Image (tube, helix red, strand yellow):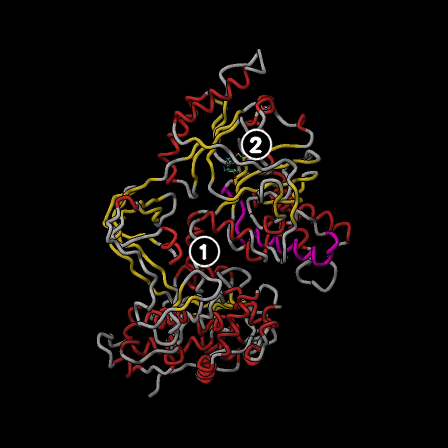
Amino acid sequence: MEGISLGPVVQLVRTLACHARGRGFESRPDRLPLSREAAAKRIDELVREIAEHDYRYYVLAQPIISDSEYDRLVRELKELEEAYPELRRPDSPTQRVGGTVTKEFPVVPHRRPMLSLDNAYDRRELEAFHTKLLRYLKAQLTDLAEPLLYIAQLKIDGVAVSLHYENGIFVRGLTRGDGEKGDDITANLRTVRSLPLHLQTPNPPPFIEVRGEIYMDRKDFLALNQQREEIGEAPFMNPRNATAGSLKLQDSAEVARRRLRLWAYYLEADEEGSLPASDYERMHLLKKWGFPVIETLPPSPLPEVWDFITHWEKEKEKLSFDIDGVVIKLDAWPLREKAGFTAKAPRWAIAYKYQPEQAITQLKGITYQVGRTGYITPVAELAPVRLSGTIVKRASLYNYDEIKRLDLHLGDWVVVEKSGEIIPKVIRALPERRDIFAKPVEPPTACPECGTLLVQAPGEVGRYCPNYRHCPPQVIGRLEHFVSRKAMNIQGLGEKILKKLYEAGLVETFSDLYRLTPDKLRSLEGFAEKLPEKLVAEIQASRQVPYERVLYALGIRHVGETAAQKIAEAFPHIEALLSAPEEELASVHGIGEVIARSVRTFLDDPENQAEIEALRAAGLQFEKKASKREGPLAGKRFLISGKFEGISREALKSYIIEHGGIYASSVSQNLDYLVVGADMGPSKKARAEALGVRMITLQELEALVGKPVEVWLSRD
Ligand code: IVH
């Protein structure tokens, strides 16, 4: 089934969009550009058009407009909604970015219980399900058409949700909860890009309920875990846990960042008569209305269902998300009604569960890794064993509680498994094969790197090395974070060099970096001749990095990029932050109690205070720069190209922004100036010439500003 084509409509609507802009809408924001009536009409068009593009992008993966064209539509809609807030529709795509904070999710009863399914683990059990169902139906129907036809669908390993649409508009979304009632997580679900906020049909049924699974792609899960580790938060065990954790977040703006996705697999209505009797056709309808529908086998007798099962067992690793089996359901709804339910599951469906690939091997020992924040992760060292085509030597054990739960003893034979997740895990020990003298694995008491006694934070499972200041992996990890791209963006300082600097006693704190000189660096073995000057210049240029990124770079636990931005907005000067009570921090939108406490603890530490002071003295930004649109470069768009001796691109970019300029992303007609350095690419030059963009030198730029770019030459 193809997505319905709206091509011509989109074209028409886009023409209208150009007209709206042509009326000078963007250039005169002080005046209402459209009458209320015209705005209402335009909002309707935009909501529909953007939904169509979301569908093409997130469901079909076939976008037809560029990101910037898309952004322009959203911006236009946002501006109209700001001018006429009462015209904001519940299905407006502007709601996808979240923003509502829910303290407690209301509990709402399900219209019909959300039951689980019985499981089958092999062909025999699947056949037993079929025979029993056939017998049950035959006892009631004399004219049963045979063979029974089933649809089969991939069983997504995610979190089940129930979605309500009234007159075609998404109005409510619930978790499964206890099956009878679930949490109302509507605001969080609106952020799921592939979930339609309205049905793509001019005459929707008055009410429908769609059930489906919210899930996370493996690559998004891995990226999320990496981000979490960067800010000292415990990683999620698998994509399903990450999804469940995300849906329970109180801040929907944070949910929006989690890249959750939907697969729909079930449709019912208040007026059942209005829907097709075949479930397969219902899946078509869902697709037509704009839902992403999971891979489904057309109505087939049991042997073909079996082929589908075995096919996907082989192919499942190629999917971008985890599945844990196949769901087999009777296709005909009238027959489903006859079959009915047992106390816990429908009689007309069964879940065929794949056995995750397992292997048995021996636990050689446990090592403990120390992270940047001192978090200790136990790792099982295994006798090498083959599993899903790779040799496994290590498995993550997450934390010491997991070791206790598994009751691991040194030398144990253990079952390891790889079920979709990339990292293998230890499922259980085999105590019957245990040596009688085997010793249980004891929790680590001291840090394997620095010997400091470990602590367990109240309410947390993990253990930490509290030697924040001097434990080597913590010091190096912290420095690595400080110089990373999203933080101070100092290039040329990798883990190896940082380690060298640390071991040579040159760098332990962040501020030590700013005290480095080319001569000091030259004294180190293995530093190339030219490198020291360049490195010192890079470090010095990072002093222009804005305040919010400096806050992020400090590596305060739980403070990610977004939290740092929010803190910087609420406390635009470090003085204000230093004296802010915990409650005040916690009351900032998007900053919860955990972050507030962590920030306070960090700032209350006298050594951290001294370090902040040292960084300030070194010239780092501890004040939020108001967007200086009044500066000498006010409102003008710039781009730089080529090389500038002694000045990094980052420094030049900061210089432009600091004086009111806007930094553009490419050469376009909108560009006012292209700042040209040495070795500029010929194609860029040609394009700039063709578009008549003014090209200026660094000196001309400095003349515009009336002040030279500050360059920090290394001095001893
Ligand atoms: S149909 C009443 N189809 O598996 C029948 N469920 O073990 C509703 N699941 O609670 C279920 N993929 O969360 C169905 N294609 C699929 C599914 C699926 C995943 C989940 C669902 C359900 C659980 C049952």
Magenta highlight on residue 164: no
Q: Amino acid at mark 1?
A: Leu
Disc 1 secondary structure class: helix
Please provide percent x and percent y for residue 193: 56, 47
In the displayed structure, 510 sits above or below 351; it is below
Q: Which residues are magenta?
A: 61-87
* Residue at 36% across, 55% down: 403
In the displayed structure, 406 sits above or below 701; it is above
Please provide percent x and percent y for residue 699: 45, 78
**Distance in Å between CA atoms under marks 2 and 1:** 39 Å
Disc 2 secondary structure class: loop
- Categorize mark 2 by other alpha carbons within 10 Å: few (<14), some (14-19), many (20+): few
Type of secondary structure dominating the magenta stretch: helix
Q: In this orientation, which residue lies closer to the viewer: 514 or 271?
A: 271
Q: Amino acid at mark 2?
A: Ala
* Residue at 50% across, 36% down: 294
Q: Can you say which quadrant of the picture contains the C terminus?
A: bottom left
| Lower sequence index among marks 2 and 1 | 1
Write down the residue under mark 1: 224
Q: Is residue 46 visible?
A: no
Please identify the residue farthest to the bottom as the structure is shown. Answer: 716
* Residue at 70% across, 58% down: 82
Q: Which mark is residue 343?
A: 2
Please identify the residue farthest to the left as the structure is shown. Answer: 525
Q: Is residue 629 left or right of residue 400?
A: right
Q: In this orientation, which residue lies closer to the viewer: 291 or 608?
A: 608
Q: Is residue 384 left or right of residue 418?
A: left
Please provide percent x and percent y for residue 586: 59, 68
